[in-house]
């Protein structure tokens, strides 16, 4: 796999998966790491020679490990929290199924494996093809090549025989339109009644107008992410999805400021502001 092929595989949105991978690897090798992810470290070591001669500013930044430290902390705290959501689910349902929607190059299975979970990584075919060169599947860990908006992949998940399901979308939903996300959530409710959904969202006012343009410009200037990776879906308040259909119930919501971790530095103060807590945050629903 050379850099030109890699460039063809990853759009602006999918490049954010490389950014989060390198963020996890950097934090895993830091002092008192928030997240311990040896697979992320191993994957970046394989990728460094491929990206070394890249023309992309983002890819060059990744190879040189020059990522905004605030982004590294955000990525690590979010991944640790999503791991915690997964472990809490598996404590109740040890043989349950977990689906990592828009997984990118995340290695969550290897961080949370309890010996009986059925774990599925779901992403577009080009991403999964590349990921299979970096990680190995096994009887309980499978990668599915499909758009999350197709319902064919849901049949594959059902075949594992699990009775309880957790669907996770970490840093995914905000890049798509509301009608697309709404239909996906309703499909999950229909096919997997009683399932849990944990997903990251942004404040709705950041998905249109001047604030949307400011957000896209911030990502481009600070992280060298392409402009097409702008935010399009958000919520006015954490419980908003409950209005989409009867039986959708908010369990909790979480902002990475809530962690009050020392590596947040002065940003720890933002946990006292509802506005900052809900600019970009995670919601946990049950789809009854």
Image (tube, grey):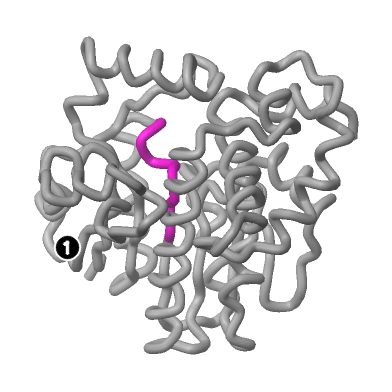
Task: Please say if 88 is above or below 133.
Answer: below
Residue at mark 1: 250
x and y, in percent, of residue 266 in the image: 28, 43
Residue 68 forms part of the magenta stretch: no
Q: How many marks?
A: 1
- What's the residue at 16%, 64% (across, down)? 249
Label 1 CA crowd tier, 10 Å (few <14, some 14–19, many 20+): some
x and y, in percent, of residue 116 in the image: 60, 87
Task: Please say if 31 is above or below 67.
Answer: below
Task: Please say if 5 is above or below 93.
Answer: above
- Report whether 149 appears left or right of 275: right
Can residue 244 be seen here? The reply is no
- What's the residue at 45%, 83% (across, down)? 90
- What's the residue at 46%, 63% (across, down)? 80
Q: Considering depth in this image, is 130 or 213 the residue closer to the camera?
A: 213
Q: Considering depth in this image, is 180 or 263 the residue closer to the camera?
A: 263
Q: Which residues are magenta?
A: 168-175
- Report whether 45 appears left or right of 211: right
Q: Quadrant of the N terminus?
A: top right
Secondary structure found at label 1: strand
x and y, in percent, of residue 115 in the image: 63, 87
Q: Quadrant of the C terminus?
A: bottom left
Which picture quadrant has residue 260? bottom left
């Amino acid at each position: 796999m050379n850099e030109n092929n890699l460039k063809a595989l990853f759009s602006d949105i999918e490049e954010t998966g490389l950014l989060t991978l390198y963020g996890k690897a950097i934090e895993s090798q830091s002092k008192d790491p928030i997240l311990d992810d040896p697979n992320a470290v191993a994957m970046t070591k394989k990728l460094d020679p491929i990206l070394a001669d890249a023309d992309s500013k983002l890819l060059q930044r990744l190879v040189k490990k020059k990522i905004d430290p605030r982004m590294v902390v955000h990525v690590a705290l979010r991944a640790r929290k999503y791991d915690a959501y997964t472990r809490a689910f598996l404590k109740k349902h040890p043989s349950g199924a977990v689906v990592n929607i828009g997984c990118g190059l995340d290695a969550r299975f290897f961080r949370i494996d309890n010996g009986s979970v059925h774990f599925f990584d779901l992403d577009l075919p080009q991403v999964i093809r590349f990921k299979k060169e970096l990680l190995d599947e096994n009887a309980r860990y499978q990668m599915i090549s499909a758009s999350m908006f197709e319902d064919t992949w849901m049949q594959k998940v059902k075949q594992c025989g699990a009775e309880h399901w957790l669907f996770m979308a970490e840093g995914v939903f905000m890049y798509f339109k509301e009608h697309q996300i709404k239909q996906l959530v309703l499909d999950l409710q229909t096919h997997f009644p009683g399932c849990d959904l944990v997903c990251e969202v942004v404040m709705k006012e950041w998905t249109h107008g001047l604030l949307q343009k400011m957000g896209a410009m911030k990502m481009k200037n600070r992280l060298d992410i392409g402009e097409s990776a702008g935010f399009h879906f958000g919520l006015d308040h954490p419980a908003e999805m409950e209005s989409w259909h009867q039986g959708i119930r908010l369990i909790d919501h979480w902002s990475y400021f809530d962690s009050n971790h020392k590596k947040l530095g002065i940003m720890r103060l933002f946990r006292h502001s509802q506005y900052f807590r809900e600019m970009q945050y995670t919601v946990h629903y049950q789809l009854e």
